[in-house]
Amino acid sequence: MLTLVTGTTGQVGRRFVPRLLAQRQPDEQVRVLVRDAARGERFAQLGAQVAVGDMRDEETLGKALAGVDAVVNVAASFRGVPDEEAWAVNRDAAVALGRAAQAMGVERFVQVSTNNVYGLGRGRPLTEEDESRPGGSMWGAYPESKAEAERELLALKDLDVRIGRLPFVYGEGDPHLADSLHWAARWAPHQRLQMAHHADVAQGLMRLLYAPGIAGRIYNIADDAPVTTIELYQLNGVEVPAGLHELTDPDPWLGIVSTQRIRRELGFRPIYPSVWTARDAGAL
């Protein structure tokens, strides 16, 4: 089995690939797609094949997919980029990769998505059967382009597509946790954020990659304990701003997901059930 992984230099990809390489069997290989050969050296030292090029280039896709059995598309473009860039990477490039994989006989395609595709809350934990409802404070080009990519990829015939929807991802030196305070300043003190540690994201994606018989299935990947705005300040060792208590939460279920499906069908259990568990383990 030869697995191609894209988006390997991002926060998720750079932590996922070493774990995928570490648990591979003797007859399994991993190929990473990078735009700069120098950035692929650390993966090559761990035993990965390295393909160089831009996934938006048709010729690059042909070379990167040669002999590949499975794809894990981690590539994403979100915060701080123009909307055109988000659409180009998150939808157009993802769908082009899926079509190229389909044409070359790739057996499995894992699309990494986001729980932001749900949009508005439903007054309960969001499930994989819930349709996207545009709106809410987190809506924009990123979740909209990811939602479109999901729809187009799942519509491809003869390609076994599996989708993993990620929440707020943190851990192992990822600056994401500190960055959360940029948004938390506008949140009510009791507003909650669904999270997952990088170790659990990797666990979830590998379960999607290797599980048989789940073509067309979507899975939420998350831990068991969303955290409040107050806790985000505490985790970062920052004093809670005066006046935060005056803010209200218009949607207490925004972005809160159910993990019942991945637990029941794929046996997923978080290594770090909460960010506090990860903190106590020194894994932040």
Image (spheres, rainbow, N blue to C red):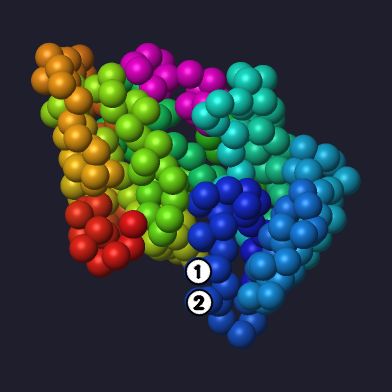
| Magenta span contains residue 67 | no
Which segment did they paint magenta? 131-148
Residues under numbered marks 1 and 2 in contact, where contact means CB atoms less than 8 Å apart: yes
Between residues 185 and 260, which one lies in front from this camera angle? 185
Give the mark count: 2
- In the image, is 102 to the left or to the right of 123? right
Q: Position of residue 255 (x, y in %)?
A: 30, 31
Q: Residue 23, labelled with which disc?
A: 2
What is the secondary structure assignment of the residue under circle 2?
loop
Q: Residue 19, labelled with which disc?
A: 1
Q: Is residue 134 at all visible to an observer of this figure? A: yes
Q: Quadrant of residue 211?
A: bottom left
Q: Residues within 10 Å of mark 2 (few under 14, many from 20)?
A: few
At x 38%, y 49%, the residue is 170
Q: Residue 74, labelled with which disc?
A: none
> In the rendered view of the protein, which quadrant contains the N terminus?
bottom right
Between residues 95 and 185, which one lies in front from this camera angle? 185
